[in-house]
Image (tube, coloured by chain):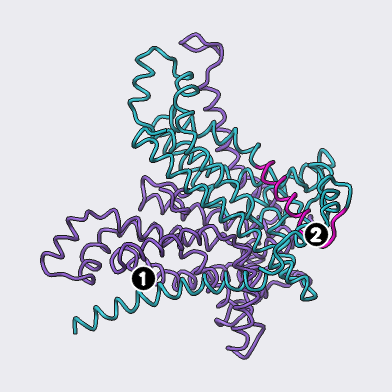
Amino acid sequence: MINRSGSIFSGHTFLLLLTAGCGLLILAVLGFMVFLGRPLFTADFFNLFMSSVWAPDQHLFGILPFVCGTLAIVILSLLIAFPLSLGNAVLINLLLPQLPAKFLYRIVKLMTGIPTVIYGFVGISLLVPFLREWSASGSGMSLLSAALLLALLISPTMILVFVESFTAIPQPHLNAVAALGGNVRHKLIYTLLPGAKNGIMTGLLLAAGRALGDTMIALMVAGNATAMPESLFASVRTLTAHIALVMAADFDSTEFRTIFICGIILYLGTLILTLTLRVFNRNGSKADLERGLS
Amino acid sequence: MNRIYDFTLSLFAGVCGLLLIASVAVMLGFLVGQGGSVLGLKLIFGSTDFREIIDIILLRQVVINALWPALIGTFLLVFTALITALPLGLGVGVYLAEYAGKPAKVFFSLIFDLLAGVPSIVIGLFGFSVTIYLHSHFSDLMPCLLISGMSLALLVLPYLVRTTQSALEELPSALRVTSFALGAEKSSIILLVLLPQALPGIFSGIVLAIGRAAEDTAVIMLTGVVASAGIPRSIFDNYEALPFYIYHTASQFSNQHELQQGIGAALVLLIICTLLFTGAGLLRKKATHHFLYHSK
């Protein structure tokens, strides 16, 4: 390799190959799951795997309950976390004086560093027994307990993105509202929310991604029953937890191979979220946004 | 009527803030209240005798019922992940910041964003199935420390790429122009001028990656972590790790003592991760300050 400047080794080519290699590896994650799951992709695929009964001993391999479990947990946790995050962002940007606002912001940042397994651990020790008492039925390991903990896990991400997009709104706009006699509520409704539309969508999508991909919380506190989720207090299993749980099965069995379908669904779900995120956020990178670094 | 709206808004936001702070306080309070008392040498080494501790550190004595093997396992894991991911992350980051054209940049940042979002259990599944595939067709490789480390490397790669890239892109353009005007080649400008200046930013990425690799449980669950393996003898061995120890204790504990050990482990992991993430934030702040004011 001799390039124009005459040096024997072209840094550009080397780095391009390195980058392309890493890119290929990322696509290979999907490719390999499709490759290993290929015996399942037959004409009967939808009948066999998109049914609602999971009973491997009767040759029923429906993973639909886990798809629904995942969706239910993601949606419920977003429903809890979105207002919570919006409230905190408003508190930080508009309502609190500088010092307490900074304090709250610090706490939120600190929360992004708490390992998920710790949320799970505290959840199983405190929240699950509490919900068991409160609902007076079941084990307390349920859709609700997982969604509550997940909401706590994804809120910091959302709050950081909301705060950032609120801060990006030019101060003169807020001053103009104040000059017209507007108060906090008017600032929020007429300047912050419309101006931060993309930021709010970004926060929601990032949080949805984290909730979709989380394994430990669902595995530890959702109960992992294989039935369709029927109520808030029902024990549910997510796709991620299913992958973790079926690992013990025989590697060549159909039961084991269903986890590749779960993996493919999760991968494609992430792809869709990532592409949608691009529409609302052209500059920021996910890795930055999640940790509030941008 | 307006007053009621205003009051409702403030009340709502206040309740949200209180809920968040209360949840964190309850979590920390529980961990510190239940586990604070076990925090100490006994938790880590299972003994407070210094001669025994030195024997344990020198691998002359086996530890039972203590965190030492899990701590060492996590350390080795992070180390393996980092030496795998660092050269890749730096290379890709430099390429994206300095060489790539607009379309390549857009495409690859999308790809790395995708990787940043792929659930860690899927990455673990990838590592596991590649291992099993190789095992049945070529070698007798089994899930082990090396496989976990390499899977974790894939997990932290996007963080390293992104921080390297933005650390380089945030450098003042005068730096680039001046070096170029002095007749330096592009590769020497990158190696001798830009990368050294971008070091604080890159370091914040490394610290972030360490924290991410240390906390992750899903990847290692599928790729070779076990509940009691002791210190691994080689990178092809099974190993223990702190987050898995916590998970295992939470689901399997049989008495109060084991539960306390688990809470202690959670507290240790929390302290490690908090320090790492705070460190990453400080480094990043320092980097920004450095570029803004050119102060040493």
User: Which chain is assigned purple?
Assistant: A
Relative to B144, is A236 on the left or the right?
left
Q: Colour of chain B?
A: cyan
Q: Could you say which quadrant of the image residue B256 lies in?
A: bottom right
Q: Position of residue B295 (x, y in %)?
A: 38, 34
When the figure is inspected, residue B269 is found, relative to residue A51, above or below; the finding is: above
**Which numbered circle lies on residue A259?**
none
Instruction: Report in which chain the residue with disc 2 lies.
Output: B
Which residue type does callout 2 highlight? Answer: Thr
Q: Quadrant of the N terminus of chain B?
A: bottom left
> Residue A107 location in percent, x, y?
46, 63
- Residue identifier under label 1: A87
In the rendered structure, the residue with mark 1 lies on which chain? Answer: A
Extreme top residue here? A6
Q: Is residue B72 magenta?
A: yes
Which residue range is magenta in the image?
Answer: B62-81
| Residue A276 belongs to magenta span | no
